[in-house]
Amino acid sequence: MELTKNIFFNTDKLVANTTVKISYTGKLFQEKAEEVFIHYGFGNSWENLSDVQMEKTELGFQAEIVLSDSDSFNFCFNDGNETWDNNNGQNYSFSIEELPTALTIQEELSLDSNKPGLRRAYIWSKKIRLAVYKIITYLPKLISGNYKRKITNNDD
């Protein structure tokens, strides 16, 4: 998701207590900076302030950040030589949403003997996956004639 020009996240929403990958192709990348750091904090007072060196890739600079349980994610970029991309002095700031409670697991599921239908379905799904794997792996070899059977010598 592109949140602003030249800044991308690997998710549609920024959610508290999750890891997000941020990609940067802004001014410093375009000016061929050798390294870029993301300077970030959370909330109005920039709590938990951190600087992380971003990894340089062909697609820009990238870093993974663990989002705090806060209401906003604030950041700017620098090249280590006091050249900053701070959104013309405004910094970049995005809202962080709380994890919806509908997505949390309320009870732990197990595959024990108390739920034989679930156990049986699990075993069948494993068997089906194994059969599909074998078909995908060996059928093309059989059709093309490249399948060689292992010959065992029994010295009886």
Image (tube, rainbow, N blue to C red):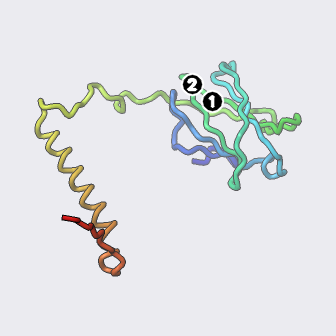
Q: Position of residue 67 (x, y in %)?
A: 57, 29
Q: Where's residue 65, x and y in %?
A: 61, 33
Look at 33% across and 74% down and name the residue there. 148
In the image shown, does 117 or 21 lie closer to the viewer? Answer: 117
Instruction: Indicate the secondary structure of the residue bearing disc 2.
Output: loop
Q: Earlier in the sequence, mark 1 or mark 2?
A: 2
Q: Nearer the viewer, mark 1 or mark 2?
A: 2
Q: Quadrant of residue 66?
A: top right
**Along the horizontal axis of the image, is 50 left or right of 120?**
right
Residue 45's spot in the image, x, y percent? 69, 18
Amino acid type at image mark 1: Phe
Residue 49 vs 117, above or below: the answer is: above
Marks 1,2: beta carbons within 8 A: yes
Is residue 116 shown above or below 1?
above
Q: Which mark is residue 18?
A: none
Q: Which residue is mark 2?
A: 68
Can you identify the residue that label 1 sits on? 73
